[in-house]
Image (cartoon, rainbow, N blue to C red):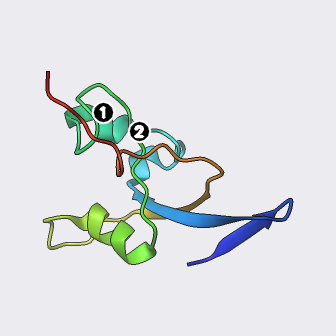
Amino acid sequence: MIDVILDGRRFPAFYRIIVPAFASTPLSGMGAARQGGRFNRPRQEALYLSADEVTALAEYKQDNPWLQPGTICTFFAKELRSLKNRCIRAK
């Protein structure tokens, strides 16, 4: 994992691999909005990032035995919103 230091603060790197169709908009969550995902409903954009390149590749590949063309993107985030530590209640 690589970090970047800005103004004396360290920011970790996060990764995602995107399909060529979305290569011009790496910050878009349109792909996740098509069918929804673990943390987003259909028609709700979400940007899924991984803490390392191997996990990003596994997320991109999922159940497909063939590795499709893609672009790995590296993000340095000052702030992230995560559902990792939130409790979601059903109403």
Q: What amino acid is at disc 1?
A: Ala
Residue, disc 2 = 29
Q: What amino acid is at disc 2?
A: Gly
CA neighbours of label 2 inside 10 A, class few (<14), some (14 to 19), many (20+): some
* 31 or 89, nearer to the observer: 89
Residue 2, placed above or below residue 49:
below
Task: Tell me the residue at 47%/39% (across/down).
Answer: 28
Q: Is residue 53 left or right of residue 83?
A: right
Checking the image for residue 10, the label placed there is none
Residue 1, placed above or below residue 50:
below
CA neighbours of label 1 inside 10 A, class few (<14), some (14 to 19), many (20+): some
* 7 or 74, nearer to the observer: 7
Q: Position of residue 17 (x, y in %)?
A: 42, 61
Q: Position of residue 69 (x, y in %)?
A: 36, 65
Task: Tell me the residue at 58%/66% (across/down).
Answer: 13
Q: Secondary structure at mark 1?
A: helix
Q: Position of residue 72 (x, y in %)?
A: 48, 65
Residue 40, placed above or below residue 24:
above
* 60 or 55, nearer to the observer: 55
Farthest-out residue, right: 7
Residue, disc 1 = 33
Task: Tell me the residue at 38%/39% (across/down).
Answer: 46
Farthest-out residue, top: 91
